[in-house]
Image: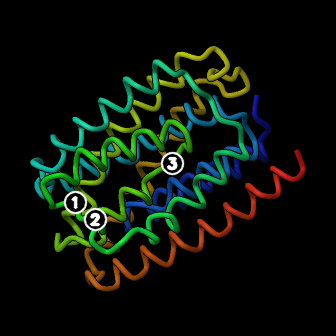
Amino acid sequence: MIGAATAGIIGVSILATSFISGVFGMAGGLILLGILLIFLDVAPAMVLFGIIQLGANGWRATLWWRLVEWHIVWRYLIGAGAAFGIMRLIAFIPDKAVVYLMLGSIVFIVDLLPKSFTPDITRRWAPPIAGLVVMTLQLIAGAAGHILDLFFQKSLLDRRAVVATKAVCQTFGHVGRIAYFGTFAAAWDTSVPMWQYVGAVALAIVGTTFAAKVLLGMTNEGFRRWSRWIVVGISILYLARGLWLLVAG
């Protein structure tokens, strides 16, 4: 079983990162997965992360249900479903160095794309492409909420519609993650008892609930500016972590 000190660190991390994701619709999961990978192997970390994020995103989607852009969600799921089917045939589990390096590099790779390829989730072709890319990266790199955020940053959607729509997309994404990694025997780490999964989801819901009030008081410009800074900062840290693991073997 996970020790009391470790459980406490993870618990505080879940609460804090759920609050961050509740405000910005992203970044919290990116931080949380990096913390879980310190204490757990890749497969069990992915399953625990998926369960936690399923609770947080599912609750966030419930809070903002009326603002969801469903025409985006349905097209997003077409791409996500295709990616899940392809990845399940491959049945690939990455090591920690690969996960960190991919989490850290993707944002900067997207920045190098020509402006004509700038992703905008409101364009007709964007949702299925986003679903294909994000689901693939969720199953390889673990977290891709910051990549999905790139598709929303260039849109003219209201910040609440952004958070609501992303929450629904990510909820389906975490169901896919659990279904994918849950089929590997190594995913169900006996050091994590069932009551800790339940407690983790409860903490995620609490953090998400408090975040809703902060989001209401934020401007659209501030929302997008802070989202970008947070993603870039975390990406740099993960690149450093991935390189260190690669060198250290």
**Image-quadrant location for residue 43:** top right
> Is residue 205 positioned above or below 48 on the image?
below
Name the amino acid type tagged 1. Answer: Ile
SS label for mark 1? loop
Closest to the observer, 129 or 8? 129
| Comes first in the chain, label 1 or label 3 | 1
Along the line of sight, the residue nearer the viewer: 138 or 201: 138
Quarter of the image where one finds residue 44: top right
Instruction: Determine whether, in the image, residue 246 is placed left or right of residue 95.
Output: right
Q: Which residue is mark 1?
A: 121
The relative height of residue 169 versus residue 234 in the rendered view (above or below) is above
In contact (CB < 8 Å): disc 2 and disc 1 = yes
- Residue 86 screen position, x and y as percent: 40, 25
Between discs 3 and 2, the one toward the N terminus? 3
Taking the spot 29% from the left edge, 54% from the top edge, the residue there is 166
Alpha carbons under labels 3 and 2: distance apart: 16 Å
Packing grade of label 2 (10 A; few <14, some 14-19, many >=20) is many
Q: Position of residue 63 (x, y in %)?
A: 23, 53
Query: If the image is split into quadrants, where does the C terminus sit?
Result: top right
The residue that label 2 is drawn on is: 152
In which quadrant is the N terminus drawn?
top right
